[in-house]
Image: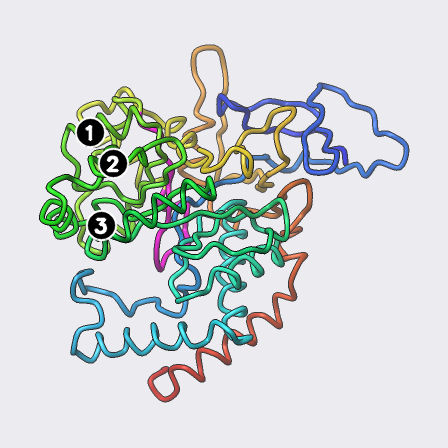
């Protein structure tokens, strides 16, 4: 495939003009003027801007069924004995029971479709229904999104279905973590070589739990057992001390910043600028109930501008976070020769203008960050294949999926639905 007359965001997040050749899943050439090969599909991209596709490094799928059920309720009070809490428990029970049914696949596919239409090519999937990892893999493979799927304490014998899937294992959250489960997680990591995932120091309560049981912070505990390394993926990392942050930065673990879910849940904020100053490796995640990675990106930018190092960080910083790879073998997040063709095609419309790029100044990274919306995205390519083309999913029947999803809403909520 030849993409001609492109304007694309390079690794410097400036705008470059060239033709891009794709063979299989890879970008094999980027040059000023490439001639189509015999039988090669050529696409004129002059009316679009091309971005690297994004990574959403913390998701809990399926979650769209839960929208609004957690409003104004802190994390520690979920599923309590109130009308709202009982409704939350009812929905959690439903998704657990639905895993082996077609309903669950519809819920997952519908959620994955929202990720793709926002320009996300890769997710780090921690699920939220019991024993759902296999179903999550099947749905990701079917719709064409890359996924690193958390298998918790399971180690399946079957191989992944495609090269777009990878597996991780889980360290129980602080309130559930004990010596035995810690030892089991260490053994699984050693046996599988999979990335270790966990929610890390998300709340003050969870920090106190680790200190109570182990006399160490979660970060110190991971470091003590050689689990704090570039294979680790740690969500939130909010209640950290300076010592924790030094350890996190030097380890090169992927720390996932989730500013929207943190604010909605009432959690504090990650010490983002301090971690960046220390050289930490950070990605971005929507977490739970929101699939708007652009809102996450813009909120992250605003947080950095409220820091005492505002002048040190800019829109390019946020672009780098949004394209930081959870697993380089799965997703690269860069438009370069030799990298996988994970691309987002955005209409070059007035909402993004004026795009100015001249010696000593460019507003391209800023304008594309601040003014791109999901509805400006025409197409999304994953591993060289269009999974969204001209606004429509190529891998599943959208109309049928939305109809089935609507029927589930009506069946689950019944007379409570208005």
- Say which of marks 3 and 2 sits in front: 3
Instruction: Give the alpha-carbon distance from disc 2 to disc 1, as whole Å.
Output: 7 Å
Image position of 394 (left or right of 66)? right
Q: Earlier in the sequence, mark 3 or mark 2?
A: 3
Name the residue carrying label 3.
179
Residue at (33, 85) in percent of width and height: 416
Mark 2 and mark 1 residues within 8 Å of each other at the beta carbon: yes
Name the residue carrying label 2.
303
Question: How is the structure coloured here?
Answer: rainbow
Mark 3 and mark 2 residues within 8 Å of each other at the beta carbon: no
Q: Is residue 383 magenta?
A: no
Name the residue carrying label 1.
307
Residue segment shown in magenta: 280-296
- Place of residue 295 in the rendered image (x, y in percent of width and height, measured from the top left): 37, 46
Instruction: Give the alpha-carbon distance from disc 1 to disc 3, as whole Å.
Output: 38 Å
- Place of residue 394 in the rendered image (x, y in percent of width and height, measured from the top left): 68, 56
What SS does tag 2 mark? helix
Residue at (50, 28) in percent of width and height: 355
């Amino acid at each position: 495939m030849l993409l001609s007359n492109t304007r694309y965001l390079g690794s410097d997040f400036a705008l470059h003009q060239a033709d891009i050749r794709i063979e299989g899943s890879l970008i094999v050439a980027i040059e000023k003027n490439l001639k189509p090969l015999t039988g090669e599909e050529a696409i004129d991209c002059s009316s679009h801007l091309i971005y690297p596709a994004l990574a959403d490094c913390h998701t809990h799928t399926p979650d769209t069924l839960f929208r609004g059920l957690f409003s104004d309720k802190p994390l520690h009070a979920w599923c309590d004995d109130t009308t709202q809490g009982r409704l939350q428990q009812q929905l959690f029970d439903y998704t657990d029971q639905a895993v082996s049914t077609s309903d669950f696949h519809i819920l997952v596919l519908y959620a994955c479709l929202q990720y793709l239409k926002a320009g996300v090519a890769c997710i780090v999937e921690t699920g939220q229904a019991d024993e759902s990892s296999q179903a999550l893999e099947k749905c990701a493979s079917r719709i064409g999104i890359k996924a690193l799927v958390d298998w918790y304490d399971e180690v399946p014998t079957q191989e992944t279905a495609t090269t777009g899937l990878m597996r991780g294992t889980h360290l129980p959250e602080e309130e559930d973590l004990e010596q035995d489960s810690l030892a089991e997680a260490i053994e699984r990591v050693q046996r599988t070589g999979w990335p270790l995932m966990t929610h890390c120091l998300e709340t003050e309560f969870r920090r106190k739990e680790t200190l109570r049981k182990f006399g160490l912070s979660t970060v110190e505990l991971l470091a003590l057992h050689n689990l704090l390394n570039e294979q680790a993926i740690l969500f939130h990392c909010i209640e950290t001390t300076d010592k924790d942050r030094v350890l996190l930065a030097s380890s090169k673990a992927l720390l996932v910043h989730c500013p929207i879910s943190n604010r909605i849940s009432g959690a504090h904020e990650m010490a983002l600028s301090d971690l960046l100053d220390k050289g930490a490796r950070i990605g971005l995640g929507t977490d739970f109930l929101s699939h708007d990675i652009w809102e996450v990106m813009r909120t992250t930018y605003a947080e950095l501008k409220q820091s005492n190092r505002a002048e040190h960080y800019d829109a390019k910083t946020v672009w780098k976070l949004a394209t930081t790879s959870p697993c380089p073998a799965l997703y690269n997040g860069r438009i370069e020769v030799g990298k996988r063709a994970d691309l987002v095609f955005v209409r070059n419309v007035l909402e993004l203008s004026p795009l100015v790029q001249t010696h000593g100044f460019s507003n391209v990274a800023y304008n594309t960050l601040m003014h791109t919306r999901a509805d400006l995205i025409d197409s999304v390519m994953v591993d060289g294949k269009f999974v969204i083309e001209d606004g429509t999913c190529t891998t599943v029947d959208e109309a049928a999926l939305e109809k089935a999803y609507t029927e589930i809403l009506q069946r689950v909520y019944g007379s409570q639905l208005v």
